[in-house]
Amino acid sequence: MSKPVMVRIRKNANQLSPAERDRFTTTLAKLNDQGAGLFKDFREMHRQQLALAQAHGAPGFLSWHRAYLLDLERELQRLDPSVTLPYWRFDQPAPNLFTADFMGRSGALGNVSFSGTNLLRQWQTDGAAGVTREPGFNVQTGRANVINQAITLLLGGDRPNAIFDTGTDQDGFDEMEFNPHGNAHTSFTGSSYIRSRGTAPRDPLFFLLHCNVDRLWARWQWFHNRFDGTQPNTFFFRGSATSTPHTDIGHNLLDTMWPWNNVTGFPRPDNAPRTPFPQVATATAPGPAPTVGDMIDYLGFLNAQSDMNFAYDVPFGVAPT
Ligand SMILES: [Cu+2]
C-alpha cells in the first residue's frame, strides 16, 4: 500500500537556485502588497506587548513560532504552491542571501536596496517604505554572533535534554531562545527592524531567521528523539493535574495558542488577527486551534495524523555538525 505525498522541503537560503529565490521574494512581496496585504496580520501578531508575551520568554516559544511560520508558509503556498520558507543558517556565512536580488543589500544608515527585478523593492510596512537593517558582521565572509549548531544541539544536556527546564534555572533547550535566537537578532545594530521583537516582522529576513530557529529545534528533536510531548524530556510543562503548570497562559502543553484559538482579552490581546489556523488538503495537522503540544510531532512520527507536510532539507540521519 502506498499513499501519494508531497512534502514541502524548506531549504538553506544561501543555496537556493535563482528561480527558487525569485519565487519566494515575489510571493512574499505579493502577500504584503506594499503594506496593504494579508501579511500585515503576521506583523500584528508579533508587535504589541501582550501578543509578544504569548510567544516569548516561556516554554511555548518554539511551538508558537512553528505555528506562526507554518501559517505564513501556507498563505504563501496559496499564491504559489511551489514556495517554501527558506532558512538563514546564521552560524555560517550566507553571502548569497544579503544581495540585492534576495534579502537586499544594506547601505549607509541601514538602508536596504533591492535590484530592479526583485519585487521586494516595493516593500512597505506600517506606512514606511523599505527595510532598515545594519548587519554587525561581514555579510560576505562572516556569520552572526551566535553559538554554532553543534553547541546548540547539546543545550539542555543535563536535564537531560528537556525542551524546557523546571523553571528554577536555565539549563534546558529553552536556552536557545537567548543564544542563538536572540543573538541572531542582536547581530544587527542601530535601528535595524530585526533587532527588536516589535519591529522584527517588518524585515523579511526575520522569517528566514526564525525558520532556522525552527530547524534547530527539529534537528534537536531528531537527535534526541523528542517527538512525544507527553514525555517531560520533550516538554516539561504539561499543565495537567499530574504535572506542574506553567503560570503563563499559552505555555503549557495542552494550552491552545493565541491568536488561532480566537481567545481574546487579558492576558491575551484584545483581538485575534489570525483565526482559525489555515487548513489544507495536503495535511490534517495542526487543527484550527493548535495547542502547544500539537506542534511537536510535525513529521507524524508518533501519529501519522500529526504530519504537517513540511520538512527540512538537511538529512538528519547523521551526527550533528
Ligand atoms: Cu518571536
Image: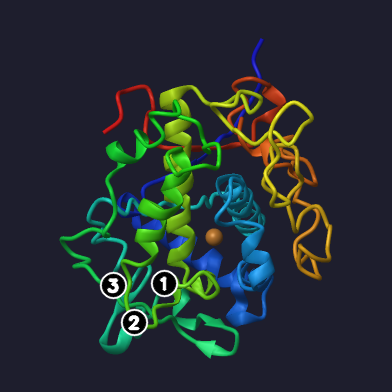
Residue at the spot of label 2: 190
Label 3: few (<14), some or many (≥20) within 10 Å? many
Expressed as whole percent of the image width and height from the top left, the position of residue 93 reads 22, 56
Tag 1: residue type? Arg
Q: How is the image coloured?
A: rainbow
Residue name at image x 83 percent, y 58 percent: 262
Q: Disc 1 or 2, which lies upstream in sequence?
A: 2
**Three-letter code for the amino acid on which mark 3 is drawn:** Pro
Q: Please report contact status of discs 1 and 2: CB closer than 8 Å, yes or no.
A: yes
- Give the distance between the C-alpha atoms of the residues marked 1 and 2, in whole angstroms: 8 Å
Residue under pointer 1:
195
User: What residue is at 76 percent from the left and 68 percent from the top?
Assistant: 269
Residue projecting furthest to the left:
141
In the picture, measured across the screen, residue 39 lies left or right of residue 91, that is right
Quadrant of the image where one finds ligand 1? bottom right
Q: CA distance from mark 2 to mark 3?
A: 9 Å
Circles 1 and 3, Cβ within 8 Å, touching? The answer is no
Q: Which residue is mark 3?
A: 135
